[in-house]
Image: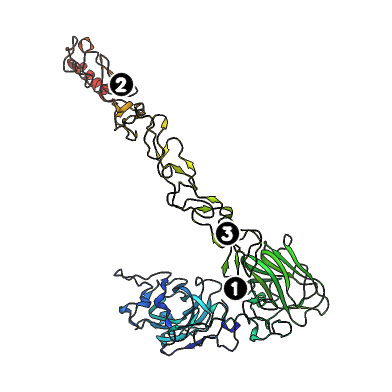
Amino acid sequence: MKMISKLQTHIILIMIQTCMMTVTAQINLALHGRAEQDTTYKDGAGISYNANLAIEGPANNNWNDGCSSTAGNQSSTWWGLLLPKLAYITSVQMYLRNDVPTRMNDFRLYLSNGTVYSETTELCYRDIKKQAYLNLNRSIDCDNSPSTNVYFFNRYTFIQLCYIEIYGCWKGFWGEKCAKPCPPKCIDQHCYPTNGTCIWGCDPKNCMSNTCYSTTGVCFGGCVLGRAGQYCNKYNLAYNQTAKIIPVGQTNARLSVDGLISTCNSFSFTGTSSYLQVAFESLSVITTVHFVFGDKTTDDDGHTVYCSNTTDTWNDGTLLYRGKRLETDINVFVVCIYLIYVPPMLNGDSLVELCEIEIGGCPLGRYGINCKNVCHCNGPYDLITGNCTFGCLDGWIGYRCDIACSSGMFGNQCREHCSANCLNPPCNHVSGKCNEGCNRGWEKYNCTKECDIGHFGSNCSQTCLGCISNMCDKVTGRCTYISACKPGFLNGEYCNQECDDWYFGINCAKKCNCRTTPCNKFDGTCSVEECERGWHGASCDEECTNGYFGFSCKIFCETCFNHSCDIMQGNCRAGCIDGYRGRTCTMMSGISNVLVHIQYMLQLFF
């Protein structure tokens, strides 16, 4: 985040005011944001002190009236207000807990457009003297840097806030209750919420101090922040981006992209591996490179500029310029993510004093004064108008390729028709994909493929595996051949009702008698276990033959007369042979009787 001091040096950056004051000029942005904290304290009664308590009120210091609190003793802890859009924060009023006031000692107040740990997070205030306990009700004035998030941060303690008000204006508004829009000439509608003056300058007068040479139009004193080129008519891709200088440590690379020509880097010595690299956030279209050198910079040949898609190398990059020091724009047209400047080899007292590198262009796919407009060109395009040179990407038409295909059309130049089988037309205008799936009987992303055999319904997700040859209607699932179903299913139009357990075969007409687990519903085969008493066979559907009984008919009733016995328990039907008695003819006199009975019982159960 760029500090306001980089914009207007006479503005005081951060003012801390430890007495309470009434703020009437702006609005309380806390009422429009979402409160969050990294942890939440819960007391012994199970009461949670969530982040939202800090913005609900009442405006006092009493813990029992409701204060937010993080869990304690964390290596780092934070409370944050996340705003729905960019705003300028002018003042933060806070009420701290009065019974344990020292817990907020050494707190930090940050403004950010990301998380509290983002590299661009800006410190508004720190209780560096650890005296928060001395002033529990205070107002802290921050600078006017635009932010979307406000954070209270501390280490190894709590963040406990009884009430918070965060005053400021949404970007584009200023004045009493932020009711006045910024002047229309302010770039991107950035103005100070207190007086409405433009922050980034005005368009088309983008020269610093609104001064330029009348004869050439070249800006005097450089450009306003965020603009590039000798005419300050380009969006500056380099401004506030990541920059580094190799060898590390000899100078501050950030000074080359801070937007100020008054802050410079000095190369007092260079080698074959010396360079400065600027990294963009994404692939970008570069049309202009403009250097601002100090007066002492050598005029020798060897100033070289490359465009590359690989960090820290230019071997596979594009050479944009090599020659003497230039004070004018280097006009190019190239797409890359890194721009690398290689200074010339220095001799004697010569040096390179680089004050600013300005890179005019837009992130790929954007155009306009501040690169806010989007186009979908298939190749080069005009960064001002957005007009495409070689046509559009799939799904787009128009000079700027910013018009989506009409309903029902998609693809290259919108010539393709969406499938008639989309469940809820139209399809995706780029790919032709049916956004909400297919009508019954169709599948794949564009719903142009009929269901495979054995499948039907929405996105072909249902099966008709009970139909003969798996043949069924792709929409309803009604079997093609309705005279019968596959074994294992009850006859019907859809053959979608499986046999009940213990039944199998055509129309589930057969019954199996497996000992514990139901048989296969198609062919009736039982698992490796035995059949029930009185049954045998692969499907356990055959009664025991004469003379056998029990599980899987394994026991032979040899002491029954004529081997005639009950197939379930083995009870003899016609009496016993000589020497035996009892229902199962297993009883004999004496010890022999006992042994025979034991043998019988073992056969019966095992």
In the picture provided, is 252 more to the left or to the right than 127?
right
In the picture provided, is 111 more to the left or to the right than 6?
left
How far apart marks 2 and 1 lie (CA) works out to 87 Å
Cβ–Cβ below 8 Å for labels 2 and 3? no
3 vs 1, front mark:
3
Asked which quadrant contains residue 244, the reply is bottom right
**Mark carried by residue 370:** 1
534 over 122 or under it: above or below: above
In the picture provided, is 106 more to the left or to the right than 43?
right
* Visible residue check, residue 230: yes
Location of residue 386 in the rendering, given as x and y in whole percent from the top left corner = 62, 66
2 vs 3, front mark:
3
- Judge by depth and name the residue closer to the eye, 375 or 500: 375
Q: Residues within 10 Å of mark 2 (few under 14, many from 20)?
A: many
Q: Earlier in the sequence, mark 2 or mark 3?
A: 3
Q: Earlier in the sequence, mark 3 or mark 1?
A: 1
Asked which quadrant contains residue 500, the reply is top left
How far apart marks 2 and 3 lie (CA) works out to 76 Å
Q: Quadrant of the C terminus?
A: top left
Location of residue 143 in the rendering, given as x and y in whole percent from the top left corner = 52, 83
Asked which quadrant contains residue 313, the reply is bottom right
411 over 304 or under it: above or below: above
Q: Residue at x 43, y 72 (%)?
A: 73
2 vs 1, front mark:
1
State the SS at label 1.
loop
Residue placed under numbered mark 3 in the picture: 397
Tell me which amino acid carries mark 1: Asn
Q: Earlier in the sequence, mark 2 or mark 1?
A: 1
